[in-house]
Amino acid sequence: MTRTGAEKTGAAPQGPQARRAHVERKTRETDIRLSLDLDHPADPQVSTGIGFFDHMLSALSTHGRFALDLRAKGDLHVDQHHLVEDVGIALGAAIREALGKDLRIRRFAHAYAPLDEALARAVVDVSGRGYLRYRARIRRSKVGGFETELAREFFLALAVNARMNLHLDVLRGRNAHHQIEALFKALALALRDALAVDRDLAAVPSTKGALSESQARQGARRRS
């Protein structure tokens, strides 16, 4: 279940500067509460029960310059898959909600991030279409207990639910910790740029005139 703060409290709609979202999502497998503020950075508050994943999400928030408060519990006695994927779903949904209706953003961005011998690249298009291209040969199956193959599942859930194109590559590296952390940092830097507001734009940066399905449908209603 996903609800913004305004929906929960009956508050007035958020103003153009308030790009915030609050997501609560509960299933038989996971229980997630997440608050996001794209424009007012703060120290990340993250607790998922998976230490390395917490570290990566904190890096994403810190270098992406957005505030993230996340409390997540899940069936870790089964494995980590459900929790990691569902956090990606919740964070992606929160990003999309926080963007709101005014999508005059930079939209396209790319970034590289090194970490010692590792180098990663992230290319982002906040296009309204979810897609992931992931190319990373991680050298170990686990880092600090985190199942490294789940990094892809997190990024996929994030891209689909934020409705953005995301291309991620580990270009080099031999230390698995460094490889994955470089990926998260590269994504953070690219998102920081792609989600940045550009009020000088007269309209959304798209030849279609829309970056969301709701905008396209509103256009159809106006035409009729």
Image (cartoon, helix red, strand yellow):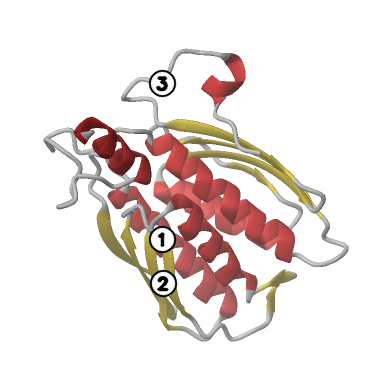
- Within 10 Å of the Cα at label 3, are there few (<14), some (14-19), or many (20+) other Cα atoms? some
In-front residue for pair 90/38: 90
Residue 21: give x, y in percent of width and height. 50, 33
Q: Under tag 1, what secondary structure?
A: helix
Viewport quadrant of the N terminus = top right
Amino acid under label 2? Leu
Residue 111: give x, y in percent of width and height. 31, 64
Q: CA distance from mark 2 to mark 1?
A: 8 Å
- Label 1 or label 3, whichever lies nearer to me, is 3
Tell me what residue is drawn at x 47 percent, y 47 percent. Answer: 62
Q: Is residue 205 left or right of residue 78?
A: left
Which residue bears the numbered disc 2? Answer: 168
Tell me which numbered mark, 2 or 1, is placed earlier along the sequence. 2
Q: Under tag 2, what secondary structure?
A: strand
- Label 2 or label 3, whichever lies nearer to me, is 3
- Assess whether mark 3 and mark 1 are in contact (beta carbons under 8 angstroms): no
Amino acid under label 3? Gln
- Assess whether mark 1 and mark 2 are in contact (beta carbons under 8 angstroms): yes
Tell me what residue is drawn at x 50 percent, y 53 percent. Answer: 161
Q: CA distance from mark 1 to mark 3?
A: 27 Å
Q: Is residue 81 left or right of residue 34?
A: right
- Within 10 Å of the Cα at label 1, are there few (<14), some (14-19), or many (20+) other Cα atoms? many
Q: Is residue 36 visible?
A: yes
Picture disc at residue 187: 1
